[in-house]
Amino acid sequence: MMHQQVMSKLAILLVLSLITGAGVSRADVRLAPVFTAHMVLQRDKTLPVWGEAKPDALISVTFAGNTHSGRADALGHWKVIMSRQSANATGRDLVVSGDGPTLTISDVLVGEVWVCAGQSNMEFPLKNEVTAKEALAGADNSLLRLDLWHYRSQYVYNSPFTPVQVEGLDAQRFYEGSWAPSTAESAREFSAIGYFFGRQLQQKLGVPVGVISLAAGGSPTEAWMQRELLAQTPELAPIVAGNWLENPALDDWCRERGHQNLDKPLADKLAVPTDDLGPNHAFKPTFLWQTGIARLIPFAMRGVLWYQGESNSLELRRILQHEQLFPRLVRDWRAQWGEGDFPFYFAQLSGIETTSYKSQFWPQFRDGQRRFGNTLPNAASVVTSDLGARNNVHPTNKHTVGERFARVALAKTYGQIIEWSGPVPRSLGVRENQLVVSFDHAQGMAAKNGEALRGFQIAGADGQFSDATSRIVGNTVVLENGGVPQPRQVRYAWQPFPDANLENGDGLPASTFQLSLP
């Protein structure tokens, strides 16, 4: 009899647990998705750890022999700030306790952490890189950790989303992923640029390095920005006005892709997550901010690598719009992270001909990126136009791009004495009928492979550019053309797929640029 009573009580408890299980799990302490086994914490910075729990729950976080506590607010959100840590290559446990089971995050290292964001050339996986076979064969490195934030609709192009992919458009579940030590398996789908950057940093610095990649192919700049930031800027407010699929302020190509992916699911009455800006999608204004960056902040990290712009450069009006978007994005990310002017390094667009792509305005876009590198604090642009593919918007040489990013970081962030930039135009002067461009980062400046110098054009007051005879004199390039008797302007590498070859002694190429006399 007693046995039957006990069994009855156990049955009742089991039923109750099944009924109330969701409520119990909501009361358990949980961590933000960036906190998983094998992660890297940023050295020499205070370390926010945050998540959710039962309202008013007391939370304790223990790491490296130190315990820090805090309390969840009325909505169950909590954040604990851990003390600074020196670099440490020994995997240790991060333990979080509160209501419910204790969470243990194992094999946590301390070192350098970088975030990779942007569109498809940053997303481009290592398995498709030109040196993939060799790179993957040597990918095992327990001190390089990779955190790939992938999503269900990744690599879905001009076709309708499936029900599973539609389900993955929920803002709180769009990105999925976890940290892993670098191996052939974990690296093959990871950002090739992020991998080569992280590998170079780890080798040169000798400390653990963690790279987080949450790039999304095709995503425009505005998808990575806060709605409030766009709405409060008069010239940008139209971006967040109404259903993005029908919004003429956005790029035609982005909206076309959105219709290809979403029209059928909407017609089939699938439950596509939506709000007043329309159905969710990686191209939707503010969506990647909301589901990606906002959920990563305030994770302590060193800086950001950015490769984006193809989706904002197909129309001249969009390039002018990007001149407003990009510096605001950089300033706002820094403000929201609250870490001051952390490093923000970005790749210029590569090269591609107009026969297969709407790249006619890419020289203007690259020149704008060059100027951002000069004017934004603690920022730098990385030239990739010499690595372009004539008819492919996704050049397969990503190891050189990653290594150029690493050069910038090693010099500008970590203080190593190495050259990190190709020749950068400093000033434009005139000498009779010649223009003289002075350059910084010009040590050993020459034409690549000893060839004749190419890529320079000059123009007079009429603005009609003609190829110029050019010669290098020290840290200057002297330009002339007998048909342009009073030259006033110069431009370099001003083609979508440039035929230009100026570099410095470290083999780093000069950027596309245009300069005019006052």
Image (cartoon, helix red, strand yellow):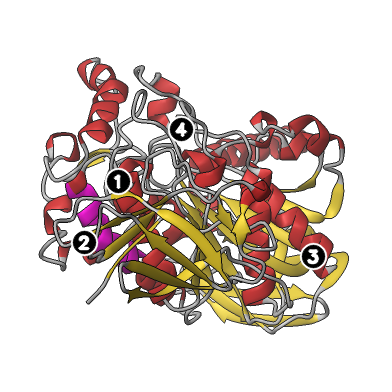
Most common SS among magenta residues: helix
Please report contact status of discs 3 and 2: CB closer than 8 Å, yes or no.
no
Name which residue type carries label 3. Leu
Q: Above or below — where is 448 with respect to 298? A: above
Q: Kindly indicate the quadrant of the structure image that contains residue 40.
A: bottom right
* First in residue order: circle 3 vs circle 4: 3
Q: Which residue is mark 1?
A: 312
Question: Dot 4 corresponds to which residue?
Answer: 393
Closer mark to the observer between disc 3 and disc 2: 2
> Residue 481, percent across and down?
33, 55
Disc 4 crowd rating (10 Å Cα; few below 14, some 14-19, many 20+) is some
Mark 1 vs 2, N-terminal side: 2
Dot 3, crowdedness within 10 Å: few (<14), some or many (≥20)? many
Q: Is residue 53 visible?
A: no
**On screen, residue 29 above or below 440:** above
* C-alpha separation, residue under disc 1 versus residue under disc 2: 15 Å
Q: Residue at x 61, y 74 (%)?
A: 59
Q: Give left or right: position of 438 versus 227.
A: right
Magenta segment: 317-329
Q: Which mark is residue 230?
A: 2
Alpha carbon separation for disc pair 1 and 3: 38 Å
Which residue occupies 29% across, 36% down?
273
* Helix, strand or loop status at disc 4: loop
